[in-house]
Image: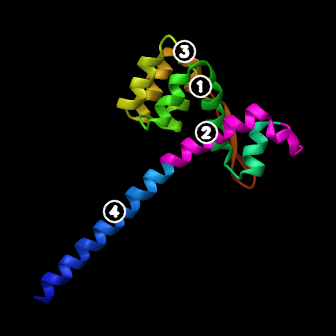
Amino acid sequence: MSELKLVSDKANSYWAIHDRAMMAASNLKRSEIEMLDALIAVESRQVYYQMEIKDLFQYCTEMLGLSRHASYNFITVMNKSKDVPALLEAIRDGSTTVSKARKVCSVITEKNSKEWIGLTRECSSRIVERAVAMANPRAAVHESMKYVSADVLELKFAVSE
């Protein structure tokens, strides 16, 4: 009888951990929406100027402590959603994420928004990236440079055949 109880306790703990992970994922999605809405308000009132900060990107990284990558994603999506409000609505209703939305910002317009938002809803990030690269080859690779050690930089750029 004690063996059966032990197995049952393990199963319950797995479910408890799973429930915790599900709750965290739900909170993360809500937090993305709240961050976008907050940044829209910050930008519309130019709150960062009141703090003697030159732009929204610097505000995000220095005042909010967001990574450069997260700041770029939020700002890019926020700016594009001014022209394509459906993009912001898709994030708000939970049918896409900020990360996937950012991937289509170089190609999405008000006219083609249903197709691109549908793609972000239905497909993996890799498929979305590939579709964007086919529609806009220049958007496929962003030039970048980062330190990989104290004296070595990694350089990323596109080269055509």
Using the rendered view, name the quadrant where residue 88 is placed.
top right
Distance from disc 4 to disc 1, alpha carbons, whole Å, reads 34 Å
Marks 4 and 2 sit apart, C-alpha to C-alpha, by 27 Å
Q: Nearer the viewer, mark 4 or mark 1?
A: 1
Q: Amino acid under label 4?
A: His
Q: Which residue is mark 3?
A: 109
Of all residues shown, which one is farthest toward the top? 111
* Numbered tag placed on residue 6 in the rendering: none
Q: Earlier in the sequence, mark 3 or mark 1?
A: 1
CB within 8 Å, label 3 to label 1 = no
For the record, the magenta segment spans: 29-54
In the image, residue 21 lies in the stretch drawn in magenta:
no
Mark 3 surroundings: few (<14), some (14-19) or many (≥20) residues within 10 A: some
* CB within 8 Å, label 3 to label 2: no
Label disc, if present, on residue 81 of the rendered structure = 1
Q: Residue at x 18, y 78 (%)?
A: 7
Q: Which residue is mark 4?
A: 18
Residue at position x 63%, y 31% in the image: 78
Give how far across and how far down residue 159 sits, in percent: 60, 22
**Element marked by disc 3:** loop
Question: How many C-alpha atoms fall within 10 Å of the one at disc 2: few (<14), some, or many (≥20)?
Answer: many
Single out the residue that lies furthest toward the right.
52
Which amino acid lies under the numbered mark 3 shown in the image of this protein? Thr
Label ID, residue 36: 2
Front-lying residue, 51 or 122:
51
Q: Check the image and report above or below for 20 versus 73.
A: below
- Measured in 3D between alpha carbons, the distance from the residue under mark 3 to the one under mark 4, in whole angstroms, is 39 Å
* Tally of marks: 4
Q: Would you say the residues marked 3 and 4 are in contact, meaning their CB atoms lie under 8 Å apart?
A: no
